[in-house]
Amino acid sequence: MNKILENKYPYLTNFFETAISQNRLFHSLILYGSNNYIQYAMALELARKLNCLEDGNTDCQCQNCRWIRENKHPAVMTISKIDNKTDSSKTVISEDQINMVLDTLVNSSDYHRVFIFCDAEIKQLKSEEMTIYQEFKTTGYFPPQENSEDKIWYPSGINTACFSTVAANAMLKSIEEPSSKVTFIFLTNNKDDLLQTIVSRSQAFSVPDSKTINYEVSAFEKYFASYPKFNKETALDFAQCLLNYQNDNNLEPKYVIDCVQYYLTQLAKTNSSNSVLMNIIYKDIEKTQNSKKMLDAYIKEQTVYEELGFYFVKR
């Protein structure tokens, strides 16, 4: 993975690397948070890893990697109200654009096709926006349109105002029954800004603001001493440990789940040659991701932690 993104978002990059190595990356992803440019860089990095002709290393110079860094790859498309337009509309992602996307899926391709959906405009940047743009430039990627001296292509989160229900519904069948080697990525500020039928068919990942996130695992890693075995006598202790860690440090419960996922993705990186163990780890990562959905459904965090602990025992 790109070293800048890897250093800032180790959990996300580890998760995506594990999913790609196991050929289990979900076909529809939502990246949400306030820094849409970093989300865009993450989406391009996923596209590069999926299309790399060699080993996927950050400095790979294969043709696909070069094209994607330059934002010129024929199978990696940014879809916004100003990018890859097929009609005269300038305020929305149109149904015509969606039909264009769907038409490209009729024929098979040697590439892994990636469609990145966002809102965007070309504008003069404010000071804070320029800081975010400069951070994006350090990742080594180019925006989909050339910048002028005073105006820069700048992404923002997709929402129902620029991505209408009609256009979104036109995609549902392709998301439900995806073609092989196709990934849809939606960039948004909040999952609630997207049509719920798309959210329910996608995996959603929070991309925190630009500061580096540290994941503390020492509070609970002792429970994984005999991993992948998990002692049933300690399942409730594990849940209580997570709850205490949350309350003692005034943490968001989703961050606690992220810490568990980060620990599992670290295990994946150190056991990549063990296909049997990798399969178990990836299923456990998926389960912890589902724990976030339980939290979104306003289930008490103690119940979520207990359910996760007993899953590790029973699997």
Image: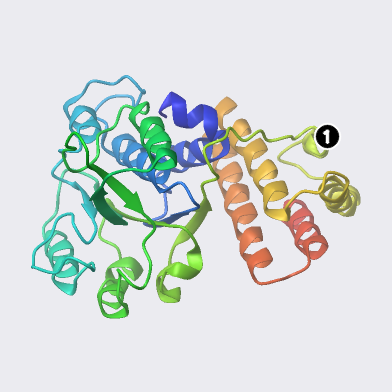
- The reply, left or right, for residue 293 in relation to residue 140 is right
Quarter of the image with the C terminus is bottom right
The residue nearer to you, when weighing 238 against 114, is: 114
**Is the residue 7 above or below the residue 148 in the image?**
above
* Residue ID for mark 1: 222
Quadrant of the image containing the N terminus? top left
- Where residue 87 sits, quadrant-wise, is bottom left
Q: Is residue 155 left or right of residue 251?
A: left
Residue at 57% across, 38% down: 11
Q: Quadrant of residue 62?
A: top left
Residue 296, percent from left and from top: 63, 67
Considering depth in this image, is 260 or 106 the residue closer to the camera?
260
The residue depicted at 26 percent of the width and 37 percent of the height is: 51
SS under mark 1: helix
Q: Is residue 213 above or below residue 138?
A: below
Relative to 28, does residue 160 appear above or below in the rendering?
below
Residue 274 visible somewhere in the drawing: no
Q: Amino acid at mark 1?
A: Lys
